[in-house]
Amino acid sequence: MAYSTGSYKFYLTIILLVAFEFFAFGQNKCGFEGFQMTNTSDRQILEARTKLRIPLVFHIVYRDKKFNFPKSVILEQIQTLNDDFNGKNAQVSTLSPEFSALVGDFNVEFYLAEWDSSCIAFSGIQRMKTHILDLGTYKNNAGKRAIFYSNEGGTDAIIPSKYINIWVAEMESLRGISSSPSMANSLEDGIIIDPRFFGNHSLNDQLYEWGHTLSHEMGHYFGLNHIWGSLANECVEDDGIDDTPISYGPNFFCRNRVETCDGINPMWQNFMDYTQDDCLALFTAGQVDAMKLNLNTFRVGLLTWNDCSDLTLTRVKIFPNPCRDYIVITLNTRARLAYSLYSIQGQIIVNGSLDEGENYILNMNHLSAGSYILELVDPQGHLTKITQLVVKI
Ligand SMILES: [Zn+2]
């Protein structure tokens, strides 16, 4: 059983009233406490018709160069995140039938952002060296968290209404911190992860080395509470999700030392517990529903990032058309584009790539009079501009 807040409207009211940023310091903890979650009963409004795509921006802020992780570590972390959110974690196969029936599937693809705030092609990764000890938790004299501000020694969030910003920065006593849905689009909206708990690499903490700390914090980012609720070490208050069993308090080790409430099997395999990484396996379907509700209520901008795509297309100019000996293609953008010229029957005649900021002249004088198709595609293959060209003799 679990605590249920009742109606959807009541649930939204609770979210708006709760104070959202709580930081609890202690080894192996994350910086999110005391959030009230709800039961959601109307799954029909939550079901995504197609796989959701959500862009991520990583801020690698390192004091020691060993924590300036290569892109390969970041991509591996994203894969772990996708597996965890889509019910694909390898540990799912070890669950009892009681719990394996509850595994949720978010049907989401987290991916590296491709454009910065100026619609310039972007790797999705910002890197900065710092000399500030434990910058992830450092606050200035005014109580401002420095990691979120470039003028305080951190890095500014990039379009937090559209991208999930993730800072990887040292924190002495925390594994991670997450903002809540009510902080959407604020300058401090996002997640901070200590590098010892980020990804899967040789420098990791031995208990939390499989990259599930980001999944835990992402759960908070979409509004989940810890599985035991806001009050630890009691069996009354819970996380507000119907299909997670009531839990006594945080578990750190699996298969032993697990406290129970009235003999109910504790779900220490849940990503919203503190259990060591190699025992974690699932978000429940109820948790996924709650996260999708918060996504669609507070963070819907994450699903609508296509402005730069449109901008890129309008920045491409092709002239003259009709043409005689050549055409000019101008790119007023730093994006690279691949081009292909086809006959009207669909046979490819020539192809190549256009570098950023280039005026490109495409020779047409060897072609017979008639119509041709020019196709331009961006490096990710997402954008296509197709123009019909007419060649005159
Ligand atoms: Zn937490």
Image (tube, rainbow, N blue to C red):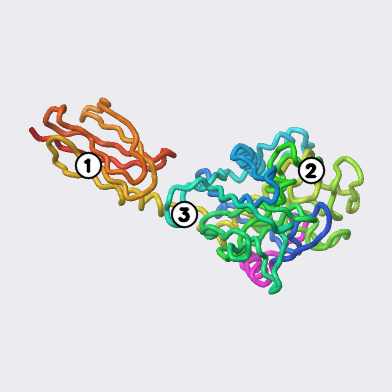
Seen in the picture, residue 293 relative to 96 is either above or below; the reply is below
Quadrant in the picture for residue 210: top right
- Give residue 205's mark: 2
Seen in the picture, residue 53 relative to 154 is either above or below; the reply is above
Determine the secondary structure under disc 1. strand
Q: Earlier in the sequence, mark 2 or mark 1?
A: 2
Determine the secondary structure under disc 3. loop
Q: Callout 2, which amino acid?
A: Asp
Which residues are the magenta region?
1-20
In the displayed structure image, the side of residue 273 where residue 314 appears, left or right: left
**Number of residues whose C-alpha sits closer than 10 Å to that of mark 2, classed few (under 14), some (14–19) or many (20 or more):** some
**Residue positioned 62% across, 42% down in the render:** 74
Instruction: Give the number of the mark in front: 3 or 2.
Output: 2
How far apart are labels 3 and 2 at the CA level? 36 Å
Q: Earlier in the sequence, mark 3 or mark 2?
A: 2
Residue at image mark 3: 304
- Give residue 47's mark: none
The spot of residue 120 in percent (x, y) is: 43, 51
- Give residue 328's mark: 1
Report the number of discs. Answer: 3
Front residue (pair 58, 226): 58
